[in-house]
Amino acid sequence: MAQLLITGGAGFLGSHTCLVLLEAGHQLLVLDDFSNSSAISLERVAELAGVPLQRDQPTLKATLEAFTLVEGDIRDTQCLDALFTSAKAFGQPIEAVIHFAGLKAVGESVQQPLRYWDVNVVGTQRLLTAMNFHHCRTIVFSSSATLYGYPHPNQIPIPETAPIQPINPYGASKHAAEALLADLAGCSGKPEPIQASSGGWRIARLRYFNPVGAHPSGRIGEDPNGIPNNLFPFITQVAVGRRPELTVFGDDWPTPDGTGVRDYIHVMDLAEGHREALHSLLNSDPQLLTLNLGSGQGASVLDVVKAMEATSQRAIPHRIAPRRPGDAAITVANPTLAAQQLHWRTQRSLTDICRDGWAWQQDNPNGYGEACL
Ligand code: NAD
Ligand code: UFG
């Protein structure tokens, strides 16, 4: 059992991972500024885990219980220092950090590159500075398959050694944060995905492919702001009648049915991948791990439409439109290294993803927006 700090823990991926980590017996301190989430997700995580959610301030007033929430910004150095200092003062020093907090909308990053660098790069640097000062040198970092840019067809499925070529400010900010982590580990410029690290740092850079779906209870799931940019939440909103039709961006890609192919990974598989990465770091010598989290299976836009139609027993009206600028034809992970290193692989299928994502959407047609706890 470890005392963990989870930044961005109220968000989509953070909330599901909190549940898995609570179930594994860890004590969690969540730091979130709610810029893209609400505390309702964590109330529901607490309910599912059967523990109370304790709310506190950065200068903790009380001994940490299983699950504590502090509202604050990862760029706020005083807030970070207060958290590490007061946890230590209560005899519960933070042993490791899982760092989800960040901005993730590709289009928005093109409009607001400074904001993306500020939160994703400066925020990460301030977090690492506080960790370093307080001798907490274990971190699992949310990276992204977006680093692979437009992968070359002969590099599908994509290994971790594929060229890194971010094609938008979001990707550039994740690349910069990855580089900072490599520098800390003493591994600057070395491409190997598994390396010994100097200076005592234990670091996992996890490159997610397309995380989707929801917890099978239907109590927590993805709650995008406004019109979803991403395929899966858009499809579930069409199925539930919140939007009239799906726009399919291109049917002339070099793929079997002409629509874009992605590696969709169930959010619970992804959450379990974090648990395994954390345990691997805590039980190993200092190292830098760089691992894809994906299923290794590709599904096209039309595959997802069909799977959701079968699950929901509803037609999903869709029309073909031109390709979306910046899209790749195919991104599918080579997940071999994560399987070897973490003894982890995805357990859930596209059918499971649709079943759980649909249950969440039906029970929460407006996400957490009008939710009663
Ligand atoms: P999310 O927006 O649901 O969660 C991010 C959380 O961070 C939110 O709760 C938000 O309020 C919080 N946050 C944002 N800025 C903050 C700040 N300055 N201080 C404190 N909290 C802050 O996103 P998600 O889908 O859960 O993604 C989590 C991480 O995974 C992000 O870093 C994202 O870039 C990365 N990622 C996500 C995907 C995906 O498809 N969801 C894919 C690859 C990588
Ligand atoms: N698509 C549509 N219609 C839509 C939305 C998407 O046809 O309304 C298509 C896209 O063209 C693409 C596929 O569905 O072929 C998947 O698109 P998403 O937007 O769901 O996902 P992306 O692969 O483009 O990107 C996502 C995140 C990125 C992240 C990347 C890899 O948005 O931030 O996965 O993890 F980097």
Image: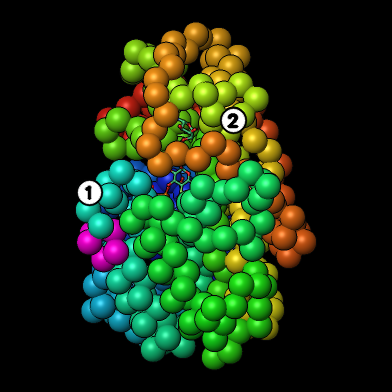
Q: Which of the 4 quarters of the picture holds residue 60? A: bottom left
**Percent of width and height locating residue 347:** 71, 42
Left or right, 85 with respect to 362, comes to: left
Verify whether residue 86 appears in magenta. no
Q: On screen, 167 above or below 352? A: below
Which quadrant does the N terminus fall into? bottom right
Residue placed at 27% from the left, 33% from the top? Answer: 226
Closer to the camera, 344 or 189? 189
Write the start and end of the magenta stretch as one range.
Answer: 114-118
> Is the CB–ligand 2 distance for label 2 below 8 Å?
no
Element marked by disc 1: helix
Q: Which amino acid does label 1 sit on?
A: Gln
Label 2 sits on residue: 254
Q: What residue type is labelled 2?
A: Pro
Residue placed at 42% from the left, 86% from the top? Answer: 132
Residue placed at 33% from the left, 17% from the top? Answer: 243
